Amino acid sequence: NVSLFTAMFKAVEDRLNAANDSEYGVQSILLVEDNVKFYSSYLPTLYLELWKQNQSLRGETMTLRERMLRMKSRPKVLLCTNFEEAADIYSRYSDNIIGLITDAGFPRDGEHDPFAGVSFAEHVLSDRPALPVLVQSAAP
């Protein structure tokens, strides 16, 4: 799937550029998911929606330079696969995080914790109560 490969490259690029881009105020969406099947479906969808949002800016009255800057500063998607990685990324970029999408359960301290996502969401919301958070799970 071409969109999956594009999304994976974008995810790697977003992670590599996060430190530099955050200094300029570029925002990020934090995605915490350990299942390849699920993040392989989320990433193309997220990037497509971000692309559509940027394309909608074409109708706004902006100079060419302003449009290019807006397109280059699209929100980044930062994928994490365990609690410790998510906590580290959140602590580094918390001021730039505009939303959290998390699985209900994922590895914490090297073992699967079915409530790690809920714990992480509670941690984030204690720091940023107005941050949009989506907790989801394939488990019943």
Image (cartoon, grey):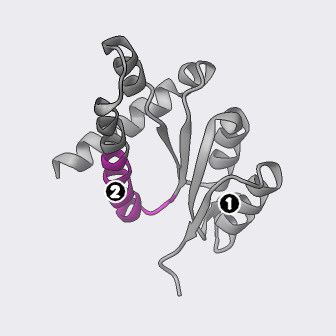
Asked which secondary structure carries label 1, the reply is strand
Earlier sequence position, callout 1 versus callout 2: 2
Magenta stretch holds residue 34 = yes
Residue 39: quarter of image? bottom left
- Name the residue nearer the viewer: 90 or 60: 60
Q: Is residue 106 left or right of residue 63?
A: right
Q: Is residue 17 left or right of residue 135?
A: left
Asked which secondary structure carries label 2, the reply is helix
Q: Position of residue 119 (x, y in %)?
A: 74, 65
Above or below: residue 81 compared with residue 12:
below
The residue beneath circle 1 is: 108
Q: Position of residue 40 (x, y in %)?
A: 34, 56
The tag on residue 40 is 2
The tag on residue 36 is none
Residue shown at 45%/26% (left/top)?
73
Residue shown at 58%/24% (left/top)?
19
Depth-wise, is mark 1 or mark 2 nearer the camera? 2
Q: Amino acid at mark 1?
A: Arg
Q: Amino acid at mark 2?
A: Ser
